[in-house]
Amino acid sequence: MESILNKINMKLNTIKRAGRSHFVNMGPIRLRQPFPTQHIEMIDPFVLLHHYGPYEISETNNPFDLGPHPHRGFEPVTFLVQGEQLHRDSLGNESVVKAGDVQWTTAGRGIVHAERPTKALVKQGGTIEGIQLWLNLPSEKKMMEANYQHEKHEDFNVITSEDQKVTTRIIAGELEHSFGRIKTQTSVNAFMIDAKAEGEETISFPKSHQGLVYLLNGKVTVNGVETLELDKNQLMEFHQDGDGFTIKAQSDSKMLFLSGEPINEPVATYGPYVMNSQTELLEAMRDYQMGKMGFLPSN
């Protein structure tokens, strides 16, 4: 009863901006990049968001085979929507990430990893789709020990709306006293929201957080005033002036909600590194070349 009353009395966050998710080319892969763009450099603490797929994978068409590559200074996170991916890294982890699973890598001082569709998916043919998020780390944690977390779809806590049409899977952070399984280095929420047509829900998050919602598919009205729709506005960012937002699905829809405490530090990026200065970027490149981030053989 208390949570229902809180929802009724909550002040809605006003919408800061809504924007399209344009396509960009990353080597052989064509994917959506809602940010960074010319208009949105980052949404602190979130540095980058990529929506890849859906791609049809087969033995004759497999562009999403990312060989060993390094990261430092941030947390690359994968939310897999469809398909199967094989993850390997220089810490010795090897795991098959399936649809609905999340892999949360804390690159810290450095990690080398590789990702690709599983051999079974390539052989049998199938669809792969996912989100890759780059979550910044504060300066005091950029050189921490690297870590890898893989959590399965069925293990996340789920909140269901009163009308039973919206499910919110809590990946990280907290919602209505229910917590995510991912251990985070900073104050951050990550929820995957699935809504059936006409489903309604209210999502709360702290005033201290920057918040955004990204539409993967479907059509949704936010706060009763702004619509998210594929190939139109897919990303919505909120002002830090309320307690949450409302959604009403116009059709079956899937959304990713993210919020986080801004780090408010200088950000310097180059390729797979997110640091605070150009000097630190040069150090990262040197350390990788010297093998200080570990090794991962190709296979």
Image (cartoon, rainbow, N blue to C red):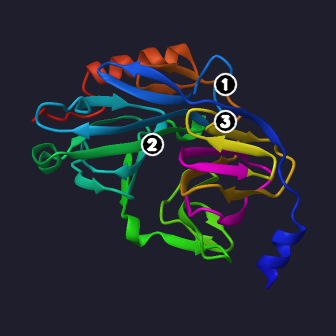
Q: Which residue is mark 3?
A: 44
Q: Is residue 115 visible?
A: no
Q: Which amino acid does the dot numbered 2 rest on?
A: Ile
Q: Quadrant of the C terminus?
A: top left
- The part of the chain drawn in magenta is 193-221
Q: Which amino acid does the dot numbered 3 rest on?
A: Asp
Pick the front one: 135 or 98: 98
Is there CB contact under 8 Å for labels 1 and 2? no
Give the residue at x 58% y 25%.
36
Tag 1, which secondary structure? loop
Answer few, some or many: residues within 10 Å of disc 3's Cα (few below 14, many 20 plus, some between 14 and 19). many
Q: Is residue 176 magenta?
A: no
Q: Which amino acid does the dot numbered 1 rest on?
A: Ile
Circle 3 or circle 2, nearest the eye:
2
Query: Toward which corner of the image does residue 58 lie, by quadrant?
Result: top left
**So how many labels did they put on this image?**
3
What secondary structure is the magenta-colored segment mainly? strand
Answer few, some or many: residues within 10 Å of disc 1's Cα (few below 14, many 20 plus, some between 14 and 19). few
Give the residue at x 58% y 69%.
179
Q: Which residue is mark 2?
A: 131
Is there CB contact under 8 Å for labels 1 and 3? no
Give the residue at x 63% y 38%.
235
Q: Quadrant of the N terminus?
A: bottom right
Answer few, some or many: residues within 10 Å of disc 2's Cα (few below 14, many 20 plus, some between 14 and 19). many
The image position of residue 32, as x and y in percent, is 48, 30
